[in-house]
Amino acid sequence: MKTMSRRQALRLAGGATAIIPLTMLAGRQALATDLPQVDPENATAKALEYVHASTNSEQNCANCQLYTGEAGAEWGPCAIFPGKSVAAKGWCKSWIKKAG
């Protein structure tokens, strides 16, 4: 049986430590794309006047501070609707212009 040096053990542990956050990030991205779409008939959506297609070309979910979807994605998560995805082209009364 071959023994491992302390240096080899530390190198192995360091590599494993770097992999864990990467796999968690990949899992989080998969979850974001698998979220069900918010229903405009939902009570919260109705109260906030959420629509899948904004009537104002300068205000939409994609350029809202609360939207955390990937750039260019059609749907993504929103802080207002936890566990749901909103249309990047959508809009609601909680719209706040994204900084920068």
Image: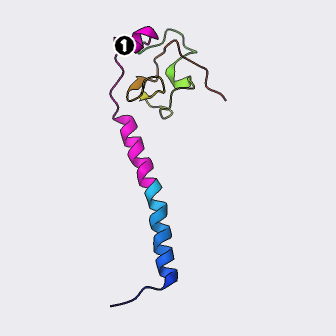
- Compared to residue 65, the image places residue 12 above or below, namely below
Q: Report the side of 70 relative to 97 (left or right).
A: left
Give the residue drawn at x 46%, y 73%. 12
Q: Residue furthest right?
A: 100
Q: Which residues are magenta?
A: 22-50
Give the residue drawn at x 52%, y 12%. 93
Q: Report the side of 10 relative to 40 (left or right).
A: right
Mark 1 nearby-residue class (10 Å; few <14, some 14–19, many ≥20): some
SS assignment at label 1:
loop
Closest to the observer, 82 or 56: 82
Q: Quadrant of the C terminus?
A: top right
**Image location of residue 21, percent across then percent down:** 47, 54
Give the residue drawn at x 44%, y 9%. 47
Closest to the observer, 47 or 85: 47
Q: Which residue is mark 1?
A: 40
Q: Is residue 30 magenta?
A: yes
**Image location of residue 84, percent across then percent down:** 38, 27
Q: Residue furthest bottom?
A: 1
**Image location of residue 57, percent across then percent down:** 54, 13
